[in-house]
Image (spheres, coloured by chain):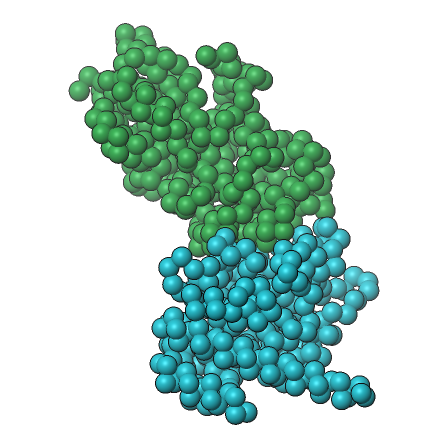
Chain colours: A green, B cyan
Amino acid sequence: MKNYLKINPGNQKASRAAFGEALVHLGEKHPEIVVLDADLSVSTKSIGFAKKFPDRFFQMGIAEANMIGTAAGLALSGKTPFLCSFGCFVVGRFETIRISIAYNQVNARIIGTHAGLGIGEDGYTQMALEDIALMRSLPGMGVLQPADAIETQSMIEYLAGHHKGPVYVRLTRQNLVSLFNEDYEFHYGKGVLLKEGKDVAFFATGGVVYNSYLAAEQLEKKGISPTVVNIHTLKPIDEELIIHVAKSHKQLVTVEDHNIIGGLGSAVSEVLAENGIGTPLLRIGVEDIYGESGTAEDLYEKYGLSSNKIYEKTLQFFQS
Amino acid sequence: MTKSAQTSELYKKLETIARDLRILALKMITEAKSGHPGGSLSAADMMAALFFHTMSHDPKNPLWENRDRFVLSKGHGCPILYAAMAKAGYFPEEEIYTLRKVNSRLQGHPDHVRFPFIETSSGSLGQGLSVAQGMALAAKLNQKKYKIYCLLGDGEIQEGQVWEAAMSAPKFQLDNLIAIVDANNGQIDGHTRDVMDLDPLKKKWDAFNWDVQEINGHEFSEILTALDRAQLERQGHHKKPHMIIANTVKGKGVSFMENNIEWHGVAPTSQQRDKAIEELLKD
């Protein structure tokens, strides 16, 4: 285990940037890939593909619902569309995703960038904080969130070629610390162990996986043995791993830059409850409130998602 | 036979088909005890023209790659689509009586996954034109000649997404996209004029830069002329998507249903069905 791990705080990249680069790379190999954007290609990073493959890029303007329906029509005609916008804007057109993409079960890849409080200064209206909850509720919809650039690349490569059915991919605006080396391979639906302990286990997803890892290191200094699991696939969630970890630890913590309702905390709770596992669980995330403007660092401190705050909350939970 | 004799023969044939489609739609809605007769009957003549004259398709090879695509954006009108598909031979006619029943492919609104010969699921209004646009883009990318037909309701185009697609299809020069509005002036809560006025409808689509034709949606001479015109290849950089505004009568062909909004989404009793069929056969 862990031969794929290479945590390097000096090496950082936003998952949206890794996505954009991966698309350019994959465009050559997969002629059926088409890309749509709603006037945010500079921000979602689909612009690289747009420049290299202008005939397969569709600028849809500020009209997300039409982008979603158009992507569905392309997918119904054998294409693999990646449709890109901020997570809140694209998922906000839920009803169109629900019928045109999900109910049709087409191979569309919905890319939602600028996830969570981590976008910082733009404030709540641009923050996707309920998107996982909405996308998880659609039958057959995969819900993915990578934790670093390497994982993003491997995930997008998988989605370009093999996967059947619709998927929502949640990406960050902010840079993420590199966690993996080039040997890392994404496996749909499988959690990834970053640290193995026996006392408290973190299940974390996306941009806060690294913060959870740092919190775990602080706990170790207190003599507590933590486990850290990266949940890149929120649906279908890795039930087997969650059950195994839950049964072998005293306490569990979920960490996500998303409302604690409907996201990772809910998904893990469902697995525990349905399997009769009573291991105590702490859900760290946005506590059913709206976000606000501020630097990402200040917001993570205020809303409890900085490594320090994760450490403090977990320690308190562990000692309670 | 002279050309005009041939033409009138064709119109007569299509009129008979349209009548049969109306009868099938009424039969299946009555059996299902729910459904939308008004908007099924108003679209019957366009459906007859599309499925039995204009479109290239092959019921024996339903997923033929080069088939023309038909998107029923006004999904609640699906009884008339099922009628056309059954009559064309996509499935056995007796299956229409499974409409809206558990385990049927013939869902209350079209379902692409349960019934892949239907090009897309629809029924949540306002989405079909965007989906048809995606199909038209794919056809262009693949250098295919097939056309994409999309039938919308007039009430339906109150949805904002329709106008997003109205903006984008001309941008992409999708002259392979042929949209038809079944302008029957009725929607659940009343006359479109009272619920949310659509006028001036033609001017709106003109302003969005579509090639617009306005016709009587029950006259085969006008329907076929408009559909033929929409097939013509244009040269140069002014390729436009096509919009046919078909003025129709809700409940067309059944006297007690015509222009009566009560029949938007109510099934006839078996006595009403028999009376309606009797009227249709008399014409």
Residue B28 can be seen in this image: yes
Q: Does residue B93 sit above or below A133 in this rendering?
A: below
Left or right, A32 with reference to B78: right
Instruction: Tell me the quarter of the image containing the N terminus of chain B.
Output: bottom right
Q: Residue at x 62, y 58 (%)?
A: B62
How far from the left and from the top, in percent, is residue A239?
35, 29
How far from the left and from the top, in percent, is residue A81?
60, 44
How far from the left and from the top, in percent, is residue B23?
49, 80
Count of marks overlaid on the render: 0
Q: Residue at x 23, y 24 (%)?
A: A279
Left or right, B212 with reference to A158: right
Instruction: Tell me the quarter of the image containing the C terminus of chain B.
Output: bottom right
Q: Does residue B36 sit above or below A213 in this rendering?
A: below
Residue B262 can be seen in this image: no
Q: Quadrant of residue A218?
A: top left
Q: Residue at x 51, y 15 (%)?
A: A4
Q: Nearer the viewer, residue B210 or B277?
A: B277
Q: Does residue B124 sit above or below A58 in this rendering?
A: below
Give the farthest residue toward the left: A320
Q: Quadrant of residue B137?
A: bottom right
Q: Residue at x 73, y 74 (%)?
A: B228
Q: Nearer the viewer, residue A297 or A245?
A: A245
Q: Nearer the viewer, residue A208 or B38?
A: B38
